[in-house]
Structure formats: structure tokens, C-alpha cells
Image (cartoon, rainbow, N blue to C red):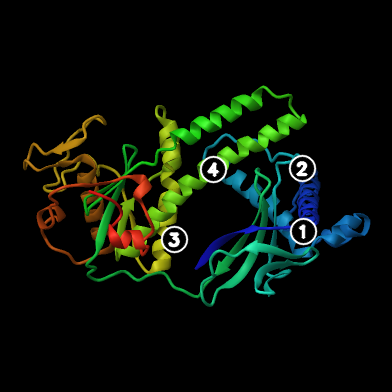
Amino acid sequence: MNYNYRYRLRPSNALAEQLAWTVDTCRQVYNHFLHRLNRTDDTSAYSEQEQLPDLKKWWNDLNQVHSKVLQKVVQRLYDNLSTLRGRKKNGYHVGTLNWKALGEYRSFTYSQSGFKLKNTSGRTTLWLSKLGEIPLTFHRDLPDNADIKTVTIKQEPTGKWYAILGVETPEESPEKPENPEKCVGIDVGILKYAHDTDETAVESLDLSDERDRLESAQRDLSRKEHGSRNWEKQRQAVAERHADLKRKRRDFLHKLSNYYAREYELVAVEDLDAKGLVELPGNSRNRAGAAWGTFLSMLEYKCEREGTYFVAVNPRGTTKECASCGVSTEKPLWVREHSCPSCGFEANRDANAAWNILSRGLEDVGVVHSERTPVETALPTDTRSVSAKRVVEAGSPTLKREPLGER
């Protein structure tokens, strides 16, 4: 299994200058090989990487950059090209690869060699070839038997530096459970971010104050002279606002996905085309802000890590179908209750969808379960509404005192 672990770097001013110089040199190498790509036929990442030793003979600065870093720059160019061709093949209108200007290229990667985690005087540092040791905030340990395959150094628009460690572990994917006792189906939405079959409804995260502060900072930026010292200072303020909003959203998604991955043996969700939903007309801002794709991605890899079986089912009709009898009923979006005209079953619209998702998940994996529908065997009496601010990670003291939140 492969995971990424992100740590904050604490370089000195001199080291920060070296990191910035390395990033800019990699940007120039990228542009150099893009120029060759546009003027040379039948090139490949491998053939272009073979040009690097000769390139170093007249481009002396490249001798101060680790060889694997330069190879990954070339690989990055051809990975971008492959992605572009793939989108064109799938019917998207695409252009060409663009020249990277200052500020548009922010990272470089070591692969296989040229890096090492060290413990210097009781403090963890990251040693990088050609750069030396860089202190970092090692806020969590790596998994046991983890093998670091790559190290990516990245500067965020805020100016802060981070190291992303690409780790490989010998763990295997969880096996299909024969008869799991703790199963859950999760329906995601906007009014309630997640509604599950245990009748927990988690509210969406309210980031309106953060968005207001971001918009205010953006208006101030628009009034500055582009490129001036005041403009650069305000640009960084805007970047800080963006980072704050992103950090709070990801913290909520990490905690919620971590809760489900640790508390259940089987988790069933809808196989949503999150990107396609965002592109639909109307209310796209709320759909984008919900970050359903990010949540499902986090949930999947955390279930894999915790040994929880994860299944994504076809989302078609989960809202319309009755979880009790299976009869499909049209419901406008504003109708928040499910009332079946066939069997008389009534439930919250999202709860009904969650039960359908769980039923499909159990069927897809061939799990042995009762012949009766989930609502017949475990019909809830009430719904527990949980504020997004009350969502905490599974296993924390707060969660032990009061699971997820208040009723």
C-alpha cells in the first residue's frame, strides 16, 4: 500500500534560498525539455533523460541538483503530456502544455535515493543530497516497516515549505468480510453532509466567515498596483486566507472519514462522479465546496489502512427507490421526506438513500445477511444531528465521552 505523509519544513533563511533556487532551476529544466518536445519528433521520457549528462557539461548549475531530481522533472513533463492526451482521447477540448513562468512551478521530487530521515540531537531532520539537513515538524510517526520511496519538497503560495514522503507498506488490501456485524451506508449531500444508516446526520461545515474574509482580502488585492511591494504583501494575505479555508475543510474531512474507517467493518458509499456533479449548472459552488470526491478518496484509503472493507455502489436511483419494498418514486429536490405510495414506509429522504446504499453494498460483495430489508431489521427511532464542529477523530477522549456529537 502507498501513502503520502506531509510534514512542515523549518529551513533557515539560507536553506530556504537554496530550496527556492532548486525549484527555479527545475522550472527552467522543465521549460528546456518542453521546448525540445515541441520541436523534436519521437521523443520519450527515457530518451530525454539520457540527454541530462550532456546537458550538465554546458549548464553548470545542474551539477548542484541531484540527478534523480532532474530525471523526475523530465518524467513530470511527459506525465503531463500523457494526461493531456488522455483527456483529448476522452472527448475533452484541450490545448498544449504551457511554459512555466515564475511562481507556476513550486516543487521538486527525490526518487529512490538522495534523502534520509535523521535524528540530530533529539530532533528529526530531513537530509537531502546537494542541500543538507533541514529541520521539520515530525508530528506523527511513519507506519511500522514503512519504506520511503519518494520525497517531494513543495513551497505553498503562503511561502511555507513542506515535505511529502511517499511511503510504501507491506500491508495487503482488506479481505471481503463473510458476515460483518458493523456495517454502514453513507449518503452525502449539501444540507446534511453525511447521513448514515445508524441515523447519524452530520451537518455541512460552515465556512461562510472564512469565505467572507477571503473575498475581502481579494478585493484589497485588486486595488494594489500589480507587482508592487504592497501587492506582494496582500497577495500573501490572500494565500493565507485560502490556506485557512482549505485547512479547516480538510481537517473536517479527515476526522469524519477516520471515524467511519475505524468504527465499522464494512462501509458502503455511492460511486459518485464528483467532478461531473460540479460541472452541472446551478449550485456548483456548494457542490465544489462540499468536496465529496476528496471525502470519498480519504475514506477509501483509510478503510484500506484500517482493514475496513470499502465498497462504492451505483448511485442511480438510491434516492427514488424505497428501502423497504424497492418501488421507485419521483421526488423533487425540495422534498426532504420519503413516503412510499406502495408500502407506506416513511423516512427521511437521506436516511432512505443510505439504507439503499448499504443494501447495494452488501449485495455487491455477496455478504450473507438477513432476507428482510435493513429498515425491517433495524428501523431507527430518531435521527442524531451532529454539528460539523463536533466531529472528532475515532478513538479520541471526546468521542469516548460522547460519540460524534450531541443528539
Depth check: 232 or 107 in front?
232
Tell which tag, 4 or 2, sits nearer the viewer: 4
Residue 138 point in image, percent of width and height: 59, 65
Q: Are marks 1 and 3 in contact (CB under 8 Å)?
A: no
* First reached walking from the N terminus: tag 4 or tag 3: 4
Q: CA distance from mark 2 to mark 3?
A: 38 Å
Res. 89 visible in picture: no
Can you tell which mark lies on residue 70?
1
Q: Disc 4 marks which amino acid?
A: Asp
Q: Disc 2 designates what residue?
A: 38
Q: Quadrant of residue 255?
A: bottom left
Residue 266 point in image, percent of width and height: 29, 63
Tell which tag, 4 or 3, sits nearer the viewer: 4
Residue at disc 1, secondary structure? helix
Can you tell which mark lies on residue 301?
3
Q: CA distance from mark 1 to mark 3?
A: 30 Å
Q: Disc 1 marks which amino acid?
A: Leu
* First reached walking from the N terminus: tag 1 or tag 2: 2
Q: Is residue 210 above or below residue 272?
A: above
Q: Is residue 110 above or below residue 341?
A: below
Q: Disc 2 marks which amino acid?
A: Asn
Q: Disc 4 designates what residue?
A: 244
Residue at disc 3, secondary structure? helix
For label 4, the crowd category at 10 Å Cα-Cα, with few meaning under 14, some 14 to 19 and many 20 or more, is some
Q: Is residue 345 left or right of residue 280?
A: left
